Amino acid sequence: MRGEFELIRKYFAPLASGEAGALGLTDDAALLSPPAGRDLVLTTDAMIEGVHFLPDQPPGLVARKLLRVNLSDLAAMGAVPQGYLVTAAWPEARDEAWVAGFAEGLGEDQAIFPVRLLGGDTTRTAGPVALSLTAVGTVPAGGGLRRSTARAGDLLFVSGTIGDSVLGLRVLRGELTALDDDDRAALVVRHRLPEPRLALGQALLDEGLATAAIDLSDGLVADIGHIAETSGVAACIEAAAIPLSAATGRAVAGDPGLREALFGGGEDYELAFAAAPGQGEAIAALAERLALPITRIGALEAGRGVTLVDESGAEVPLASAGWTHF
């Protein structure tokens, strides 16, 4: 493999092209000035081989997911992306083709999302591949969607569909063999390439439609729980209202035991948000404008905790509310 600076010049400097603050990746740090009247939003996530992605996953898809999960954090605050920094540690045995594929994946998503590489670090490790990405965005000064500002009486909404990612991981592990090839492929794509809901987050903030928001990384019940806990309210989620894709619906129909995994599986990277009851029509209009399903799945009320209920109002017991690292 080439030396560190050769790798940076060949594979990563082109990703910073056109971003003046990146300084061509020739300095120790980048320079970034937020637009007037805007605050910076900073977020970072790490991905470890064998924990967050399988060892045989193509490096370009690893890179794209790493970028997208961070953009999803920006979406949850209604932020406009500005750029990102990436740190990558590769084992000595990892060949240069992996590095080239990783950089190519970042380039593919830079053509989709309005971001450029600002800087970062590359190093060697005795362990598995370890990656970290820090994304930078902006929101109006003093603004930004928060988790802690929901109110009792607000309704709960979620974008897109829930549970595809956790089932996609099961497909990659050789499970769900009863599904047809198209359904299996659709679930795998949802696991490997989440869609950060940037336009939705920005619209919720700009139009004042949401009182609180979060992206769904740890699992639907767990992440709604974060809103409830930090806002000092209780949440009631209606299991029957949770939107499922056609592929996930067929998987659950064939094996009802999968249903519980959808509520806490994590890595959906949809947005869940709270809104006042009077915002229903405006949210429906926004969903139509963005061509993105937005579904009401419950409500917030006085109290503490999260309850998942069935169609009769009875509580649905869960073995796990969601993913936790420790």
Image (cartoon, rainbow, N blue to C red):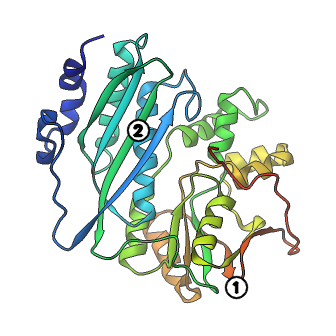
- Reply above or below: 239 against 109: below
Residue at 16% across / 42% down in the picture? 22
N-terminal label among 2 and 1: 2
- Please identify the quadrant where the N terminus is shown: top left
Residue 68, percent across and down?
43, 46
Residue corresponding to mark 2:
132
Position of residue 182 in the picture relative to residue 132 (left or right): right
Amino acid under disc 2:
Ser
Residue 236 seen in this snapshot? no
Asked whether 298 or 232 is in front, the reply is: 232
Residue corresponding to mark 1:
302
Residue 169, percent across and down?
65, 36
Residue at 41% across / 48% down in the picture? 44
Residue at 39% across / 63% down in the picture? 199
Residue 134, percent across and down?
35, 46
Asked whether 177 or 306 is in front, the reply is: 306
Mark 2: which secondary structure?
Answer: strand
Amino acid under disc 1:
Ala
Residue 91 seen in this snapshot? yes
Q: Residues within 10 Å of mark 1 (few under 14, many from 20)?
A: few
- Reply above or below: 209 against 308: below
Residue 200, percent across and down?
43, 66
Q: Residues within 10 Å of mark 2 (few under 14, many from 20)?
A: some
